[in-house]
Amino acid sequence: MTANNNTLSCHRKRNKNLGLAELIAIALGGMIGGGIFTILGISVAMIGVFTPVAIVIGGIIAALAGYSYIKLGVYYKDEGSSYIFYKKTFTQSPFAASLIGWWVIFGYISTLALYAYTFASYAISGTIFSDVEWVRKLVAGGIILLFTLVNVWSVKGMGKAEDVMVYTKLVILVVISFVFINNTQTSIPVLLHKEADISILSIFIVAALTFVAYEGFELVINAVNEMETPEKNIPRAIYLSIFLVILIYVIISIGAILAIPFSEIIQNKEYALAAGTGNVLGHWGTQLVVLGALLATSSAISGTVFGASRQMAVIAKDGYFPSFLAKRVNHIPVYSVICLSSLAFLLVLAGSLELILEFGSITFLLVSVLMAYANYRMREQTQSSLLITLLAFCGLFTGMILILYYEFISQPQQLVFIGGLYILLTLAAWLYARFRTTKIFHLN
C-alpha cells in the first residue's frame, strides 16, 4: 500500500536490472521503517511476553496479504500497484478506482504521521521534554518539513541519503538485537509465569493492531519495470523479505523483553526500545538504539513522501483528486508533496500514537482486503488458488474486525473519529468519481 522506498528502484532504472538481492533490500527498507520501534511498547503493555507471538501472527497475515499483491503484480506488471490493480480490475466502476485511491493515499498519510511521531518520541527521549506532548508533535512536524523540503529541492540528494539510511539502520538493528540478547535480565519461563492470564483473543488483537509494521513489502512491485524475470522475483522477494522481517522483529522483541523491565517499556511506550537501555547497555547503548530509531523513521519518512506524492499526482491526473495536485515542477509533484506532508502533520496534531497506529493498521488491512477481493475476481487470469485467496480475504477481514472490536470496548471515542474520517474519505471519493463521470459524459 505504501511507498516508503520507491526511490531505491528509481535510482537504478535503466542503468541496471534489479536482481533478487536488490529487490529484497527494497522491501526490507520499506517494512523496517520504524515499525518495531513503534509497536513494541504498545504490544508489551497489552500482552507482555507474548509480544513475539503476536509479531509472528502479524507476519503470517502479511504473507497472506502478499499473496494477492504477488498474483496481481505478476499479472498486471504495473508499477502503480494497489491503485492501478483495482482500477484495471474494475474498469467499469470509477467509484472503485476513486475509493481505492483515496484510501491508499490516506494510508500513506497515516504511516507518514506514525513514522514522524515515532521519530520525535526517540529524538526527545532522555531529555526534559521526553513526556511533553506538544514538543513531541512540534518535532514531528519539523522532521516532516525537513523531508518535504528535501523532496521538493533535490530528488538526487534525497536518494543518496535514503540509501545510506536504509543500509545503516539494518546494521544497527542487527547489533541492537545481539546486544540485548547478551544482556538478559530474566528468562522466558519466568515471564510466562507472570503473564499466565493473557487470552488468545488479546494476542490476535495485538497482531492486528501492529500489522502496520509489515507495511511496505509491496514496494517490490513498484520496481517491476527495472527487475529481472518478475514472474520469479516478485514472489521470491516478497515472501523472503516478510520472513526476514519477522525474524528481525522477533529477535529484537525477545531481546528487549528479556533485557528491559516491562514497567519501563510500558511507562515509556512511545520510545520503548530506548527506555531502560541506559541501565542495561550504558550510555552508548542507549544512543545506538536512538540512532537506529531515528535512521529507520527518517528513511521511512523520506521514501513515503517521495513515493506517495507521485502516486497522489497520478490519481489526480486521472481526475480523482484536485487537478492542481497533478502539476509538476522539474518533474517533481511539488503540490502533492506539500499536500501529503501537511495532512500528515494535521493527523499528528489530532491524535495520539495509538490512534495513528490503529488508523494505519486498519487502512493497510482494508486496502489488503480489497486487493484480496480483486484477486478473487481475477483468480482465473492470475492463476490463484481459490482456497488461499479466500483464506487471505478472511484473515485480513478478521484482523480489521478485531481492531474495530478493540476500539469499541476500550476507546469508543477513537472509533468515532476513525469511522468519521472514513465516511469523509468515502464521500469525497464518490463525489470525485461522479464529477469525473459527468465531465467525461459532457465531453463526449
Image (cartoon, grey):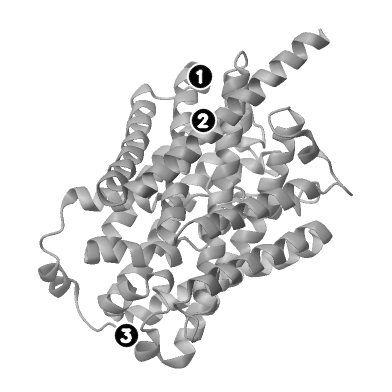
Looking at the picture, how far across and down is residue 337, in whole percent? Answer: 73, 51
Three-letter amino acid code at the position of disc 2 = Lys
Q: What's the mark number on residue 71?
A: 2
Three-letter amino acid code at the position of disc 3 = Asn
Label 1 crowd bin: few (<14), some (14–19), many (20+), radius 10 Å: some
Q: Residue at x 47, y 29 (%)?
A: 370
Reply above or below: 193 against 29: below
Reply above or below: 391 against 142: above
Q: Residue at x 56, y 40 (%)?
A: 234
Q: Is residue 171 visible?
A: no
Q: Nearer the viewer, residue 225 or 222?
A: 222
- Tell me, yes or no, whether the two marked residues, 1 and 2, touch with CB atoms within 8 Å: yes
Q: Which residue is identified by label 3?
A: 183
Q: Residue at x 77, y 31 (%)?
A: 317
Q: Which residue is identified by label 1?
A: 378
Q: Secondary structure at mark 1?
A: loop
Q: CA gap, disc 3 to disc 1?
A: 51 Å
First-in-chain label (1 vs 2) = 2
Q: Is residue 162 left or right of residue 14?
A: left
Q: Residue at x 70, y 48 (%)?
A: 339
Looking at the picture, how far across and down is residue 415, in whole percent? Answer: 37, 44
| Outermost residue, right side | 330
